[in-house]
Image (tube, rainbow, N blue to C red):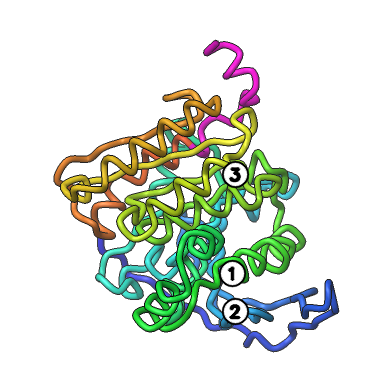
Amino acid sequence: MKRTLDYLFLRKFNSLRFRKKNDAATPMLDPVPSSVLEEEGKGRLERYTDFPASEVAPRNIDVWLPPGYGEHHHRHYPVLYMHDGQNLFVPELSYSGVDWGVHETIIELTGQGLAEAAIVVGLWNTPERIPEYMPQKPMEQAADRAALDRFAERFGGAPISDAYLRFIVEALKPFIDRTYRTKAEVEHTSMMGSSMGGLISLYAICEYPEVFGGAGCLSPSWPIAGRPMITYLKKRIPHPRSHRLYFDYGAEGRLPVYEPYQGSVDRLLEDAGFVPEVNLVTRKFPGAPHSEQAWRERLNVPLQFLLGHHAEPLTGVLDKAA
């Protein structure tokens, strides 16, 4: 649904201070949103323009606060980190002209009692999107130097997703937890993305299982990294008693390699103790295109899965399933 959005430009992002942490400049203390969007009943969207990072390019960061955040001062919220942030909230900013409507879907689900209200952090992509989103260790372990050189030539650089994830874990998340009333624990922290964003979300929960308890992987780009990721997963699957994983796909399933890769991932996870429809969900949406519109239309499914189970610890749910 098309919306008229009014931006109130407040203060420039000019009061960010730094301190040294692990020999890297880490953003600390009192960053100021460069713009704020607030609509009655739709929450509040705060934007940090060119949020600095020491190892990857600066980028815009959008933080959406659910309705009631400003009134319920003692309430804390789970946090969902999402990639391709310019496509999440505002259709005029989305490259396709269609946004995901993340805030609208969360509001609808919470109104129906199907999900917990959450803070959403949208990380805008950069011209280095594919190098940042390509799982780095799987590629480096599986590819020879010539293959990595071809990747760099085609996509503008070698994979740098380890640096991208360090930025999220060591700089962005601590800032979000300091600045907003979050539930900072692993069971209340999730990540979601589509296509390459699906791959990096899976990689994040494997690299940082102590930080991320859930991952939503919509239409993950298995054709570009399926084989290396499967080899990597055999040694790096997060513990099923503290993690949730969601996968889906649409028309991508017509590709000859797609469903075999997804099936292999599902079997690996089940062999490691993940239980279908409990802490592992894979959905097929036949014919759905690889597009923002399609992900918008089915976003309620992963959001309900990731945000709708926090009333009961996952360990208890698994015990009941057994």
Residue 34 in view of the camera: no
Inter-mark Cα distance, 2 to 3? 24 Å
**Residue visible at 41% across and 39% down in the picture:** 265
Q: Say the numbered circle drawn on residue 164.
A: 1
Q: Which residue is mark 3?
A: 236
**Quadrant (top left, top right, bottom left, bottom right) of the C terminus:** top right
Q: Secondary structure at mark 3?
A: helix
Kind of residue at disc 2: Val
Q: Say the numbered circle drawn on residue 56.
A: 2
* Viewer-nearest residue: 30 or 124: 124
* Viewer-nearest residue: 18 or 229: 229
Mark nearer the viewer, 2 or 3: 3
**Quadrant (top left, top right, bottom left, bottom right) of the N terminus:** bottom left
Q: Could you tell whether 189 is left or right of 258 in the image?
A: right
Is 55 magenta? The answer is no
Inter-mark Cα distance, 2 to 1? 6 Å
The image position of residue 67, as x and y in percent, is 54, 51
Residue 305 in view of the camera: yes
Kind of residue at disc 3: Arg
